[in-house]
Image: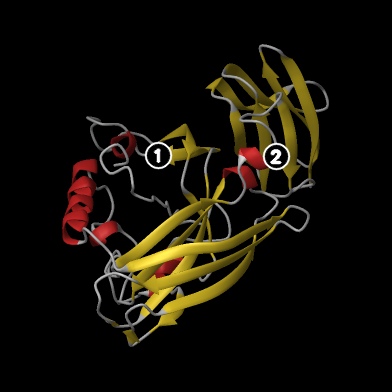
Amino acid sequence: MLPVYPQTIVTAFHGGGYFGDFIGHEIVGTFPNVEFAAFPDGLGHAVHILELLDTLERRYIESWGTPVVIEIDSKTWDPVNRMVNLTLTMNNDGYSSDLQGTYRYNVIITEDKIIKPHNTWPHCSTPNTLPHQPQRDTLYVNDWVTRKLVYLSQGRYLVGPTWLYEQKITISDTFSIKQEWVPENCNIIVNVYKDADSLYQSPVMQAIKENVIGWSDITESKPLEKEIIGIYPNPTKGLANIHIALADKDFCSLSVFDMNGRVVTRLLHSNRNPGLYNIEMQTNELPGGTYIIVLETSTGKTSKKLVIQ
């Protein structure tokens, strides 16, 4: 979609809640009377990419402009407490007329470069594959993953039943970025929409996207060296998030060893571009104890201990 419509802002919701605080199924619970309330145009599962492009194209044709403007007045990032303070102004500044209806907004936190295996049906993930093939584990780099909806599925009331022409509304929001997430890979998306009985039927009036923190705020344009930045939480019981940094495009391996030096599992074994990555590791099937996480590239190795309770 992005090569065709480069101004599109994408967010991905996972139904089972495997990617953080927000559980995608909550959208369905918020709109129980609407089938496929969380899907684009209510299309449901197993939708071909061409259908998504058709519905996106229709929206661009029907909504070629918007009267709503969103401006970020200030944004501060507190790295110690991992808090973002955001001040925004929304303005009906478009068509020299009032807007009728109730309008809401939401603040969405997404994260890019999450490496996680998915148990997938081949016919869902691979073109021209026959249905009913056995499921398989496939390692994906996930972008646009919704970590949090600050105001959950229903959003926050902004204005209504009338939004006067040139009426400006200033709001402030404060929210946290969990330790398990890489803040340099996190984005803030703010969207204003007209209230309706499901998300896909709510016309989006405007949306903006802003980095939580950029590389320019901390280093140069890329990490200075390879390293395992941290493991969160540690000790852990269940899901562990392993943050790694790669300075150059390189073949890398991320492996888990027990204290006898045996490889328990290999989390990465492929070429990767430079940047920060968040590797999610499920530890439920491993016995409690101490393990060594080893990151290896062509330039050497680095390691950290992980304790599983």
From the viewer's perspective, is residue 262 above or below residue 215? above
Q: Nearer the viewer, residue 308 or 74?
A: 74
Q: Which residue is at the front of the view, 141 or 166?
A: 166
- For image coordinates 47% across by 34% down, the residue present is 140
**151 on left or right of 301:** left
**Residue 11 appears in view:** yes
Seen in the image, is 191 located left or right of residue 309? left
- The answer to which of marks 2 and 1 sits earlier in the sequence is 1
Please provide percent x and percent y for residue 41: 24, 60
Q: Dot 2, crowdedness within 10 Å: few (<14), some or many (≥20)?
A: few
Residue type highlighted by circle 2: Ile
Q: Residue at x 19, y 42 (%)?
A: 50
Locate the N terminus by quadrant.
top left
The residue that label 1 is drawn on is 120
Residue 216 pos. (x, y %): 63, 38
Q: Secondary structure at mark 2?
A: loop
Residue on which the image places disc 2: 218
Find numbered disc 1 in the image and state the secondary structure of the residue it sits on.
Answer: strand
Whether residue 37 is visible here, answered yes or no, is no
Q: Measured from the top left, where is residue 18 in percent x and y?
A: 54, 52
Q: Quadrant of residue 60?
A: bottom left
